[in-house]
Image (spheres, grey):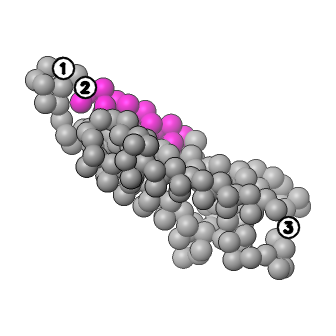
Amino acid sequence: WVMAAAACDSFSSMFEIVHLSLYAHDGVGSYFLDAVSAHLEALCDSLVALLLLSVGAGWTLPSDVLSVQQNASALQRMLGGLQSPFAALNGFTPTAVLSVGIFLVHIILAQWGRIYNDDFDSYHDLEHTPGKILMLFRILLGLGLLIVAS
């Protein structure tokens, strides 16, 4: 997870630097490189969110410490599947659906944010609707983590 997130972030920065150097040269830059940079940044954010949820669900703990409650809610079971994230992503499980959903939400919001502004940081800009939805989504993921921990 960490290496993939670091690679996405590195390539995102590289594409943005190339776009800005083209922009400094011709005053236009490359919309494609700027868009790829924004989407790689969104992918990095998705991976970090999944990493935090996985660690919070007990991914790095030994199996004898973890216990699945018999009366656990559906949300607890879904997020609890992140205790072994790679096994949960092998099939069509609720945890896999959640993971794909996290990726899709970040990618859709990154593209939607580009409608308002072409700046690289517009994905994280809280002055428009996609940025506000992104913040709300992250708050909901944090609340989900608290539910799993209880």
Percent across and percent down for residue 60 are 76, 50
Q: CA distance from mark 2 to mark 1?
A: 6 Å
- Residue hosting label 2: 20
Q: Residue at x 48, y 44 (%)?
A: 44
Q: Read off the residue under disc 3.
A: 67
Q: Is residue 145 above or below residue 23?
A: below
Look at the image and give the residue range highlighted in magenta.
3-19
Q: Is residue 98 above or below residue 45?
A: below
CB under 8 Å between discs 2 and 1: yes
* Mark 2: secondary structure: helix
The residue type indicated by label 1 comes to Ala
Quadrant the C terminus occupies: bottom right
Label 2 CA crowd tier, 10 Å (few <14, some 14–19, many 20+)? some
The furthest residue to the right: 64
49 left or right, relative to 61: left
The amino acid beneath tag 3 is: Ser
User: Which numbered disc, 3 or 1, marks the residue that appears first in the sequence?
Assistant: 1
The reply, left or right, for residue 84 in relation to residue 124 is right
Report the mark closest to the observer, 2 or 3. Answer: 2
Give percent across and percent down for residue 117. 27, 41
Can residue 84 be seen in the rendering of this structure? Answer: no
Predominant SS of the magenta segment: helix
Q: Which mark is residue 82?
A: none
Q: Is residue 11 magenta?
A: yes
Disc 1 marks which residue? 24
For label 3, the SS is loop
Front: mark 3 or 1 = 1
Mark sitting earlier along the chain (2/3) = 2
Q: Nearer the viewer, residue 67 or 150?
A: 150
